[in-house]
Image (cartoon, helix red, strand yellow):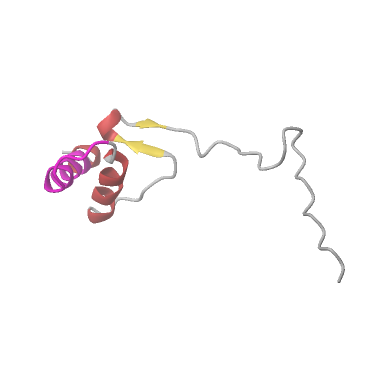
């Protein structure tokens, strides 16, 4: 059995132990990898989804629509 099969089996056990919650596959996959001492790679979704990976978090522009941050309002003088 290779690493992915071992991880998949353990992740499935974790999922069942937690009452089969939806939407936590990545958490279970990573916990299984940690328990089995297999390094977790950033951006990895896991073998439960066929070993697909996803891009790192998308870039977010925290500024205004033009991409420039609005200056902080000045404090009134006393």
Q: Is residue 19 left or right of residue 42?
A: left
Residue 50: percent from left, percent from top: 29, 28
Residue 69 sits above or below residue 77 on the image: above
Residue in the foreground of this view, choosing between 51 and 75 = 75
Q: Is residue 43 left or right of residue 17?
A: right
Majority secondary structure of magenta residues: helix
Residue 36 sits above or below residue 23 on the image: below
Which residue occupies 36% across, 48% down? 40
Find out whether residue 78 is within the magenta segment.
no
Quadrant of res 23: top left
Residue farthest along the front direction in this orientation: 78
Residue 49: percent from left, percent from top: 29, 29
Which residue occupies 44% across, 44% down? 42
Residue in the foreground of this view, choosing between 6 and 73 = 73
Quadrant of res 6: top left
User: Which quadrant, please, contains the N terminus?
Assistant: top left
Magenta range: 7-22
Find out whether residue 21 is within the magenta segment.
yes
Residue 66: percent from left, percent from top: 76, 33
User: Which quadrant, please, contains the C terminus?
Assistant: bottom right
Residue farthest along the right direction in this orientation: 77
Residue in the foreground of this view, choosing between 27 and 67 = 67
Numbered marks: total: 0
Q: Is residue 66 left or right of residue 43?
A: right
Residue in the foreground of this view, choosing between 66 and 37 = 66
Residue 67: percent from left, percent from top: 74, 36
């Amino acid at each position: 059995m290779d690493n992915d099969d071992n991880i998949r089996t353990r992740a499935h056990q974790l999922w069942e132990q937690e009452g089969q919650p939806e939407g936590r596959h990545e958490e279970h996959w990573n916990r299984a990898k940690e328990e089995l001492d297999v390094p977790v790679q950033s951006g990895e979704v896991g073998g439960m989804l066929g070993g697909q990976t996803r891009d790192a978090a998308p870039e977010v522009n925290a500024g205004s629509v033009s991409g420039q941050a609005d200056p902080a309002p000045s404090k009134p003088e006393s």
